[in-house]
Amino acid sequence: MMPLLSLNNVTKAHPDGGGLFDCTIQVEQGQAFGLLGPKGAGKSTAAALLMGFIKPDQGTCQISGLDCFKHRPEIQGRVGYVPRHPALPPRMTGEQFIHMKARLAGTKSPQKVPALMERLSINPLGYCGYMNEATRQKLSLLGALMGAPDILILDEPALNLDQMAYRPLFEVLSEEKEKGTTIFMTSHALRDVQQVCDVIGIIRKGRLAVVQPSRNLAYTRQKVYHITFATGQEASAFAQEWETAVEVLQNRATVAIPGSPQVLIKTLARYTVEDLVGGRQESEESYLRYYGDDAT
């Protein structure tokens, strides 16, 4: 069966060296896919490609078999989209923005908008240009959800939310998923994607490091070890030998590994180690470090 959303061997390079490189993502109908990675990893580029805002240098981006760039008006008409930094019309009030989005979305349920406003604690009073980031984010979420789209593309939807809206947002997204809505969501926070997504892809420096079911990440226990070597030369030699998920600062190295440290211990036996401190790390930083990047 053909996936509903797909990036197939997509490359989109930016002048600053960032972008997306040889990326393949496939999202089935009714599935929730989370793209997890640090700032600058390529998450927003993936979302922009699916929305047809930019054209890939190589590869194809499709929704329902349609090219996302060539058929962007049709695709954007059926997708609820939230950008990482919503740019709302500054001279439009929140109420005017809601009415405009309702006309464009063709909201079928008049009760849905006030219900969402209450759940997300949205205050629409005042001009959008004077609103804080959290309010603009919530208005953007409301605009994406009110038309009952069958696809949601959400780029860091919880980035600026306060605690009053954070939990309700993921309750709403879980309800959308239960209805059969297909969700593509990006985030730098593991807890965000784990709450909703069936499948999680970890991205670093524009390249997918791994794609696996969300439950697998929940069961994976990453352990981080801090190693002090006798010299900086030994730390550097160890880093070249170990290669994966290692950071070096002078004569100290930090590594993140899944499971047993047996292989690490055997490797360290060939070096002069002055100190070794290890422990379990539960945060998303350990996942991102394991796949070769910092969670910054």
Image (cartoon, rainbow, N blue to C red):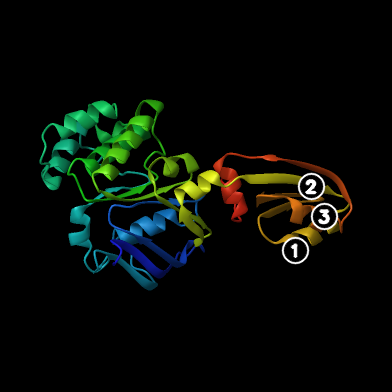
Judging by the rendered image, the residue that carries numbered circle 2 is 227
Q: Is residue 102 above or below residue 272?
A: above
The amino acid type of the residue labelled 1 equals Gln
Which class describes the residues within 10 Å of circle 1: few (<14), some (14-19), or many (20+)? few
- Residue in the foreground of this view, choosing between 207 and 138: 207
Q: Disc 1 designates what residue?
A: 240
Q: CA distance from mark 1 to mark 3?
A: 13 Å
Q: Nearer the viewer, mark 3 or mark 2?
A: 3
Mark toward the start of the polypeptide (3 vs 2): 2
Q: Quadrant of residue 64?
A: bottom left
Give the quarter of the figure containing the N terminus: bottom left
Q: Mark 2 or mark 1: name the one nearer the start of the chain.
A: 2
At horizontal 11% and vertical 43% (from top left) the residue drawn is 103
Q: Earlier in the sequence, mark 1 or mark 3?
A: 1
Residue closer to the observer: 231 or 85: 231
CA gap, disc 2 to disc 1?
15 Å
The residue at the point 34 percent across, 71 percent down is 60
Instruction: Please say if 56 is above or below 235.
Output: below
Q: Which residue is mark 3?
A: 268
Q: Nearer the viewer, mark 1 or mark 3?
A: 3
- Where in the figure is residue 22, as x and y percent of width and height? 46, 69
Question: 79 and 194: which one is in front?
Answer: 194
Please provide percent x and percent y for residue 204.
53, 57
The residues bearing labels 3 and 2 have C-alpha atoms spaced at a distance of 9 Å
Determine contact: label 3, label 2, CB under 8 Å. Answer: yes
The vertical placement of 48 against 142, above or below, is below
SS at badge 3: helix
Q: Position of residue 132 (x, y in %)?
A: 35, 32
